[in-house]
Image (cartoon, grey):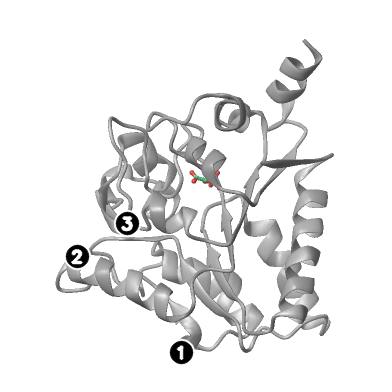
Amino acid sequence: MKLIVYRNEREASAATAEALASAIVRHPAMVLGLPTGRTPLPLYARLAELREQRHFDASRVTTFNLDEFWRLPASHPGSYRAYMERHVFSRLAIAAGQVGFLDGMAPDAETECLQYERAIRAAGGLDVLILGIGTNGHIGFNEPGASLRARTHLAALKPQTRRANAVFFEGDASKVPGQALCMGMGTILGARRIILMAFGRGKSKAIQGMVQGPVTTRLPASFLQLHADVDVVLDEGAAERLAASQAG
Ligand code: PGA
C-alpha cells in the first residue's frame, strides 16, 4: 500500500482529482468504480470544476457504483443513484448509457448481482476504483464479521450504518433501508488500481488496522493489503496513529 498524507482533506481531494483527470485524458474510455458518502464529495466537486474548465472530457468514461440500497427507488433523494446524479453524473456529463448501477428495485437480488458482475466484466473490468472506509473498517456494505462475501451480494445493514445514512431519511434511521446490494471483496480486489480516501481522526483506528493489522474479516479493508496497487490518501487526522506508531 502506498500511503499519501496531505495536510487536509481539501489538498488531498484536489490532488486526487488532478490525478484522475490526467488518467482520463490518457485513457478517455476508462472504467471507474465509485463510492458515495461524505468522503468523496470534495473530490467530486473538484473533478466537476476541472471538467467545466475543460481539463478533461468524461463523455467516454464508464462508471460502476459500489453499492445501492435494496428496495429503494432510484428517484428517492436518499438513493445512491440520486447522490451520484447530483454530484457526479450531471456535472461530469456522463451519459446514462455509460452508468453501471445496481438496481435496488430489481425483481430478484441474486439475478441483479450476477448481471452486475457480468456488466463489469463486459466493460473490461474496473481500471480505477475509488473507495472510502467506515470507522469500523467496512468497505461499502462489506461489514466486519465472521466471513466476507467475494462477489456482489445483498447485505444487511448494521444499526450504526443505518444511523450514518439517516440524513436523507428525515434523520430517522428506521426509515433507512435495512439491506443493500454491494460489490463483494473479490469484485473490489479485481480492480486494476484502488484509491482509498479517509479523512479525520475518527478514521485513524480503521486506517491503522487496515495498514498495519492482520488481514481479517473483522476489518474488511485489511483485505486491500492483498492488492498490488493501492494508494491510501489521508489527511493528518486519519494518519495520526500511523505517525505515532512509526515514531514510536
Ligand atoms: P463516509 O463513509 O465517506 O461518509 O465517511 C465512508 C463509509 O462509511 O464507507
Question: What amino acid is at disc 3?
Answer: Arg
- Above or below 34: residue 218: above
Report helix, strand or loop for mark 1. Answer: helix
Question: What amino acid is at disc 2?
Answer: Ala
Q: Earlier in the sequence, mark 2 or mark 3?
A: 2
Residue at left offset 47%, top offset 31% = 215
- Disc assigned to residue 142: none
Front residue (pair 23, 159):
23
Quarter of the image holding residue 70? bottom left
User: Dots 2 and 3: beta carbons under 8 Å?
Assistant: no
The location of residue 107, given as percent across then percent down, is 15, 73
Residue bearing mark 3: 151
Residue bearing mark 1: 97
Residue bearing mark 2: 109
> For this view, does 56 lie left or right of residue 216?
right
Crowd rating for badge 3 (residues with CA inside 10 Å; few <14, some 14–19, many 20+): some
